[in-house]
Image (spheres, coloured by chain):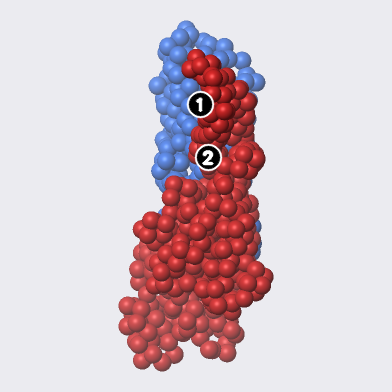
Amino acid sequence: MMATFALATFCYFIGMIKYLLHLGLRNRMLFILATIMIALGFALETVGLYQRSLITGHGPYTNVYEYLVFLGWVVFGVFLVAEGYFKLTPLGAFMAPIGFLIMLVSFAFSPEMEPNLPVRAWWLTMHRTLSFLSFGAFSLVFAAGLMYLIQERQLKHKRFGGWYHRLPPLGALDDINRVGIVFGFPIITVSALAAMIWSSQSYGKFLFNYSIALLLAGWLIYAVLITGRFSFGWRGRRAAAMGVAGYAVMIFALVIHFGSK
Amino acid sequence: MNLVVLGLNHNSAPVEIREKLSISSTRLVEHLSMLKERVPEAREEVIISTCNRVEIYALLTDIKKGVASLKKFMADYHEIDLATLEKYTYVYALEEAVEHLFKVSSSLDSMVLGEPQILGQVKTAYKAARELSVTGSVLNNLFERSFSVAKRIRTETGIAENAVSISYAAVELARKIFGDLSGKTTLLIGAGEMIELALKHLVAHGVKTVLVANRTYERAVELATKFNGEAVHFDHLHEELKRCDIVISSTGAPHFVVRKELAAQVIAERANRPMFFIDIAVPRDIEPSVNEIDNCYVYDIDDLKNVVESNLAERAKEAAKAEEIIRGEVAQFLSWLDHLEVAPTITELRAKAEAIRVMEMEKTVRRLTSISDKDKETLDKMTAAIVNKILHAPVVNLKKHAETEDGHSYIQALRNLFELDK
């Protein structure tokens, strides 16, 4: 199982390298091979997660190692769907490194299994599943935002170098921002509500600490973004920048959140 | 067998010479059949004639004589002297000829790198020759291969990807900003040739609504009819701008037609939907600082020229990749050609040796009157064995070397040493 995850990570690595090479060289074959490698890694990881859950009898929610492996799985899953749906070849070069880094970091944690856990609160499981899913969507928003900011700079400053030729049209990237937010925001909102319900059920109060404050700040950025986007027509650079900023806060919050476990 | 190309192009010859030597499509068939008669060394032939090149591809039995007759034929036909012809033409043989055709078909040898017409022109030239049955297995294979190479290069490299004309560059930029252009609205302010070209490209890429504004409303109506668009009043520019995604401006106005305040107001009213201003006018119509507004992009004529320049540079980079592909394809074709030649060469070599042996046997037997039939048989076997033993090593080695890079030189050397082409 560990070997399966290691092998999956290796596939992700090869896929990521091929995506980065494809960004530079724009060789169609590299792109196809990259997607195959990522899909293979994803399939392997799915098998690994399934095997692990057969032994533990629960989903991958019990320790930081499991969080990270699961998070990596979600990022690549969302990526594969997004690549197929939006058909933007440079996406992999921006998103695969995120997933790969998460997988890589997971190896720093102990992969121990806790098979005989008491039945966990339903709300907590719900909170974790949904927050991971939203993280996948926000990774997509982040990657698209980064590309948008670079491409917009090229177009505004009239620089027609490598980036201009390689990155997708602004319109397409703005679409990803919209779709990603529309999916990600409701999910993270429900996830936050689930966490609150769980915390009030098990502790009789709302838990509050730095990481939760940060997560709330991240949520707030996305809340402002989605409101601005749909009520005031905030699109383009502003939406892209907020997508990137929200993600940065989220990552920071997650590092502290996981670190406290 | 010697594959050669005799030709001239925009690099080797000035237009006065090119137009003199060009062959109109109506005379191509006549030209091909005449070549067949006048150049007896040519076994197969194809003639490509476009405004930038005239090239004769031929498979010759004798390269020196063949090229000389080709040149003479070309000079005679077009009534220019041989020295002038030689000054402006190039001759490539074998692998260079293969490489050259691959480059021509893939538009690596074109004036505008990556232009799409040349492939069609080569195809037409080949079809004409083929229909006249003046091509054979070698040129058929060579040309078919060149088409697939061209296709490969088009899909695997970005040689034809970026716009190299100003009007097309505007469309490319619009697509970089909006992505999909279908359903977008364009406003034309003013008139001019460039505007029409750009508009044509935009419509081809899906732009739906075309609005036309002009100082004189009648002129706007006139242009709108022409472009299948809608004339709008110049005084309502503010209102009309709100529904426009792309604005192409080319008026003779001495002042800005769209100022920053106006653009800022319009973009706010459009809920920040992006706007792309293409300013072809000199003096400019769109205030340059409009570009500073979020979601507004302003490109003037110089900017568009820069796009074209950078795209040409990008194509040149892609050409390097294409040349890599061509190198591989040339090697593949040559190895096919060698295989094609190696078997007949061996057969001819054996036949020649056998002919000598039989002749010498007969001569000797005629002189040896007392020889018994049994001895004759022994002698026959012995001579046959000598011939076989001598030929064994060259045949085996020829087969072996035919696989390598200089396979062709081995075949040619052997053919020359044994005078197989005489």
- Which sits in the foreground, B399 or B146? B399
**Mark identifier at residue B383:** none
Q: Is residue A126 above or below residue B309?
A: above
Q: Which residue is mark 2?
A: B341
Q: Which chain is red?
A: B
Q: Residue A25, image x and y in percent?
A: 60, 46
Q: Image point 43% across, 54% down: which residue?
A: B135
Q: Residue A224, image x and y in percent?
A: 50, 50
Q: Which chain is blue?
A: A
Q: Residue B21, image x and y in percent?
A: 54, 73
Which image quadrant is residue B120 in?
bottom left
In the picture provided, is B390 more to the left or to the right than B350?
Answer: right
Which SS class for mark 1? helix
How many residues crowd mark 1 within 10 Å: few (<14), some (14–19), many (20+)? many
Which image quadrant is residue B298 in?
bottom right
- Which sits in the foreground, B328 or B351? B351
Q: Image point 57% across, 28% down: which residue?
A: B367
How many residues crowd mark 2 within 10 Å: few (<14), some (14–19), many (20+)? some
Q: Residue B182, image x and y in percent?
A: 37, 62
